[in-house]
């Protein structure tokens, strides 16, 4: 008796979503179940491939944090404390090392990281409380180490500006790392602090190619706009540097010297770069992105990444995770040093001015009643 034939299961490709870096809400490492779209034999495959998926809207989830200052325990990071008013980032950078943090929220490091943004509404209030504690000692502080503090939702909520207002009152030194022109809004606060040696800013410029920027960092400021922000900061007397990070072999790596030159011309005083890192779920997300946008060189890119990471896709070890190892990593470092020296860009960390710190006032209970 003939057996019934069953259609073979075919995994659907993941078409790109306009304005988003990742193409799907990939499962995170704590999930027990994984789901895949497949052809059920009724034309599903052809239909879904033909249909252009709708880009998901961004959802802002409000929360109140118990603490906002995070202490750094890593020996290869130059700052002591950090503050991130947002979790997740709408910029959608496919390479973002912070994507896996959404897994702890039972959310996808893929689309959820870009579309479900956690806003710590009480961050300015908690910062004031922590800085005013008797036991607090000032130290180097960076805003936006995990996700960009000037991502689009900041225009509406203004949490980063309120944080800087508290730091200005306390005369507390800080640095900002961003790829957004939104920081220009706060120059009225930043410039006076910079004049006292309390502020430095780093603009992330990964490419000068608008086409590459649109798929690599789909909702971040255009490259030319970031260079104008460097100029605006420099003209206001703010020490500004450029971060060419991450350096992705055969993608933005050929632009390294040109990016440094453009940043120096715009007014940058310092520079640093970090080779591509692929921790946890960033690895499959990035490799999917490579296959969608650069299938002709995907294997070459990953082969070079493994050359720098001891034969693995990622190397999490302290001391090498931010530099890589081997001949190709050494070549990248040498190119950066040579270009920086030629352009007068420092690679040294700017000294932190701690002597001016004064604890901010705590709002009184009576005042809070009115």
Image (cartoon, rainbow, N blue to C red):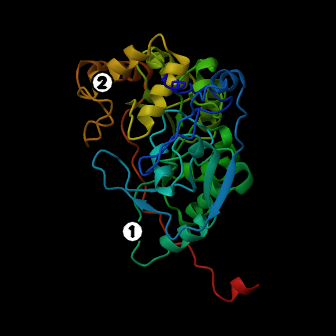
Q: In which quarter of the image is residue 162?
A: bottom right
Q: Which of 10 and 196 is in front in this view?
A: 10
Q: Specify whether 352 is left or right of 225.
A: left
Q: Quadrant of residue 353?
A: bottom left
Separation of residues labelled 2 and 1 (CA atoms): 41 Å
Q: Specify whether 300 is left or right of 205.
A: left
Q: Is residue 189 visible?
A: yes
The residue carrying mark 2 is 306
All told, the count of numbered labels is 2
In the rendered image, the vertical position of residue 108 relative to residue 291, given as above or below: below
Give residue 211's position: percent from left, percent from top: 63, 18
Give residue 23's position: percent from left, percent from top: 59, 32
Q: Specify whether 84 is left or right of 344.
A: right
The residue located at (57%, 56%) in the rendering is 85
In the rendered image, the vertical position of residue 290 relative to residue 137, given as above or below: above
Q: Do the residues labelled 2 and 1 touch (CB within 8 Å)?
A: no
Q: Which of 136 and 244 is in front in this view?
A: 244
The residue carrying mark 1 is 137
Q: Which of marks 2 and 1 is nearer the N terminus?
A: 1
Give residue 358's position: percent from left, percent from top: 49, 70
Q: Which of 238 and 42 is in front in this view?
A: 42
Label 2: few (<14), some or many (≥20) within 10 Å?
some
Give residue 12's position: percent from left, percent from top: 56, 26
In the rendered image, the vertical position of residue 97 relative to residue 361, given as above or below: above
Secondary structure at numbered mark 2: helix
Quadrant in the picture for the C terminus? bottom right
The residue located at (46%, 77%) in the rendering is 133
């Amino acid at each position: 008796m003939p057996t019934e034939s069953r259609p073979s299961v075919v995994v659907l490709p993941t078409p790109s979503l306009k304005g988003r870096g990742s193409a799907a809400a990939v499962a995170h490492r704590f999930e027990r179940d994984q789901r895949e779209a497949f052809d059920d034999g009724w034309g599903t495959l052809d239909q879904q491939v033909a249909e252009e998926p709708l880009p998901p809207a961004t959802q802002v989830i409000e929360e109140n944090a118990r603490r906002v200052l995070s202490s750094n325990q890593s020996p290869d990071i130059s700052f002591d404390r950090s503050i991130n008013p947002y979790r997740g980032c709408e910029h959608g950078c496919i390479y973002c090392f912070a994507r896996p943090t959404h897994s702890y929220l039972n959310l996808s490091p893929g689309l959820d990281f870009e579309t479900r943004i956690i806003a710590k509404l009480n961050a300015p209030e908690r910062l004031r409380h922590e800085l005013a504690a008797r036991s607090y000692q000032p130290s180097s502080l960076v805003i936006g180490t995990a996700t960009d503090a000037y991502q689009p939702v900041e225009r509406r909520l203004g949490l980063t500006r309120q944080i800087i207002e508290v730091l200005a009152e306390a005369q507390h030194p800080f640095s900002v790392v961003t790829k957004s022109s939104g920081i220009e809004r706060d120059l009225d606060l930043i410039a006076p602090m910079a004049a006292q040696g309390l502020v430095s800013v780093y603009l992330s410029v990964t490419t000068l190619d608008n086409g590459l920027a649109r798929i690599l960092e789909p909702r971040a400021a255009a490259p030319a706009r970031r260079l104008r922000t460097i100029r605006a900061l420099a003209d206001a007397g703010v020490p500004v540097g450029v971060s060419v990070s991450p350096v992705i072999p055969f993608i933005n790596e050929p632009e390294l010297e040109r990016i440094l030159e453009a940043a120096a011309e715009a007014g940058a005083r310092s520079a640093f770069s970090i080779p591509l890192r692929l921790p946890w779920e960033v690895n499959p997300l990035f490799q999917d992105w490579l296959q969608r946008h650069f299938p002709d060189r995907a294997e070459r890119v990953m082969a070079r990444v493994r050359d720098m990471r001891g034969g693995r896709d990622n190397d999490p070890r302290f001391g090498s995770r931010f530099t890589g190892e081997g001949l190709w990593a050494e070549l990248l470092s040498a190119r950066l040093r040579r270009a920086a020296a030629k352009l007068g860009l420092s690679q040294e960390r700017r000294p932190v001015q701690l002597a001016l710190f004064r604890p901010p006032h705590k709002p009184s209970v009576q005042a809070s009643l009115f």
